[in-house]
Amino acid sequence: MCILLFKLKSGFSYELVLAEKLFSLGARTPLVVSLCNFSKKTAIRLYKATQQRSPKQGLLPYDQTWIIRSSVNNLHASIFLGIFQDLTNLQTDDDHDARLFITAYELYCQVVANNPRPSKLEKSVAQFILLDINRAWELNHQFNSNLLNLVICKKCQARFLRLNTLKDPFEQCPICEVWADRIGRRRWSSAKAKQIA
């Protein structure tokens, strides 16, 4: 019956596979609705069928200042959005946005899981993955709305995210403009300057 249904709806089986993959990565139903062109009702049914439980309720994580709360957050967001933008620039017309998003997120997960020296914040989560897929989607929206942009550090040449919504855009490299406090937490250089003043 299911195979017949897939044959009748062209492209539906592909969307179904993408939705299942997104759910397995921790995506919530609003993200699947956006990327796979399913109705909310269909996305909820698919979630229940694939995850054997009801989906989590509530809004997706939206925090405009998440990337500046810690240098580690900025580093993770910069890795993901850098990968996603590179893939987007290489895409062809027949590439699917959901497939590109999934690929970028999986590459991000592989990169951070191989961190030889994780910070205390990274050690507190499984496989050092601080950026969940739902927040990654929200960061992508912020990037596309020009609330964030990628810049190159003049010292270390790393590509990192800058928050454009502050009066003076927040622009500190999460690699070379940080220091560690007494208990090993990474802090922005500007926080040390405020502490000294």
Image: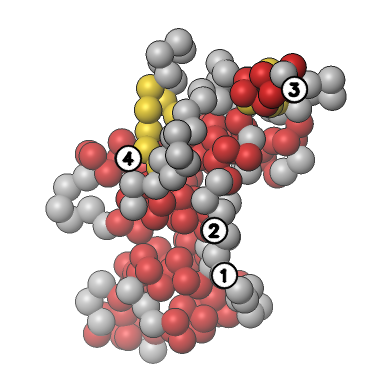
Quarter in which the C terminus is drawn = top right
Q: Which residue is mark 3?
A: 195
Quarter in which the N terminus is drawn = bottom left
* C-alpha separation, residue under disc 4 versus residue under disc 3: 36 Å
* C-alpha separation, residue under disc 4 versus residue under disc 2: 20 Å
Q: Which residue is mark 4?
A: 85
Q: Residue furthest top?
A: 155
Q: Which amino acid type is marked by label 3? A: Gln
Q: Secondary structure at mark 3?
A: helix
* C-alpha separation, residue under disc 1 versus residue under disc 2: 8 Å
Cβ atoms under marks 1 and 2 closer than 8 Å: yes
**Residue appearing at x 54%, y 35% in the figure:** 74
* C-alpha separation, residue under disc 4 versus residue under disc 1: 25 Å
Q: Secondary structure at mark 4?
A: helix
Cβ atoms under marks 3 and 1 closer than 8 Å: no
Taking 97 as reference, is 181 left or right? right
Location of residue 99 in the rendering, given as x and y in whole percent from the top left corner: 34, 54
Q: Which residue is mark 1?
A: 59
* C-alpha separation, residue under disc 3 versus residue under disc 2: 29 Å
User: Which is nearer the eye, 32 or 135?
Assistant: 135
